[in-house]
Structures are given as C-alpha cells and as structure tokens.
Amino acid sequence: MAELARSPQSPQKAEQLSASQDIPVRFLWSILRELRQHRLVLSNRGPDGGYRLARPPAEISIADVIRAIDGSLASFRDLKLSDLSYPGAAAALPDVWRAVRVSLRKVLERVTLADSRSANCLPVSSNRPKSTGMTYGITRSSCLLDHDRSRMAGCGVVVR
C-alpha cells in the first residue's frame, strides 16, 4: 500500500510492487485480492493496467489496511478479550491487553497512508505521562507517544 500511495493515480503491476518490496508475487496477489475485496485498491486489466488506491492516501488509515488483511488489529492467543483469563497474580492482564488494543487502535486509525510517506507521521508531543509510567518508544525517532493524547512521530510504535 505504501508503494501505491507513492503514485496514487498511476496503476502499478503486481510484479513491480513485488520487486520493489521484495514480496513473492503469488503472496502479493492474495494480499491484493483481499485489499480489492475491501475496496482499498482497484485493479485494471490490459497493457496499461495494474493496481492503484481506491481512495486518496489521506483517506486510508493503516488500521483499514490491517483489518483488510488480518481481520482484527490486535488479538491475544486468538481469543476475544472477554474470553481471556489468567489465574492468580496475572488475573489483571486482560485489562492490560484491553488498554494496549485501545491505544493501538487510536494510533493506527489516525495514521494514514499519506502520513506514512513522511519521516514524521504525526505531530510530536514531548510530554511523557507522569503517573502511569507507560511510555511508547518510536523506532524511527527518539520521540514519544503521549499516552493521553495519542500523538506520535515516526512510524513504528514499541510499547516499553
């Protein structure tokens, strides 16, 4: 999707996308089929055909892409969080997983394909949460996600 977002108006052949992203073409075809079924990409046949985004990059979130390919944004042991339980001292972990899922969803729904084209995806907050002790590191930058405001920089989020 990032490759398609680079030139959203021009169709690109699966073979070109495969080569540029080092993805086996047969695997890519199955991904493109799912993206097409979810109306995120369009395909045109013929010598000038190929795949292109169905909407402008600013209207397609990273969450849209993940949901089209994987279904849910976050799963834990392939169980619904309401069915997940841990014994003893770990009994509170489902609440932690819920918080992770909510935070992940907030970020992935906010970052679009257009945002991901830049080194700084979103405005940066230099404020760290004071009382929770939770910080979110960004793999491409030394900036932090402000837990309360769900703002980030860079594109790879790592929970610390």
Image: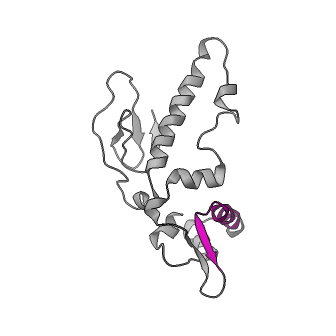
Between residue 40 and residue 10, name the one nearer to us.
Answer: 40
* Residue 63, percent from left and from top: 53, 50
* Residue 94, percent from left and from top: 60, 24
Is residue 41 highlighted in magenta? yes
Compared to residue 49, the image places residue 96 above or below, namely above
Colouring of the image: one colour
Q: Quadrant of residue 135?
A: top left
Q: Residue furthest left?
A: 126
In magenta, the rendered stretch is 28-44
Compared to residue 83, the image places residue 111 above or below, namely below
Label tally = 0
Q: Residue furthest bottom?
A: 47
Compared to residue 102, the image places residue 22 above or below, namely below
On screen, residue 142 versus residue 69, left or right, reads left
* Residue 154, percent from left and from top: 38, 50
* Residue 15, percent from left and from top: 63, 75
Q: Residue at x 33, y 43 (%)?
A: 143
Q: Residue at x 46, y 74 (%)?
A: 7
Is residue 74 highlighted in magenta? no
Between residue 68 and residue 155, name the one nearer to us.
Answer: 68
Q: For the N terminus, give its image quadrant.
A: bottom right
Q: Residue at x 52, y 69 (%)?
A: 4
Q: Residue at x 37, y 44 (%)?
A: 152
Compared to residue 17, the image places residue 146 above or below, namely above
Q: Quadrant of residue 160?
A: top left
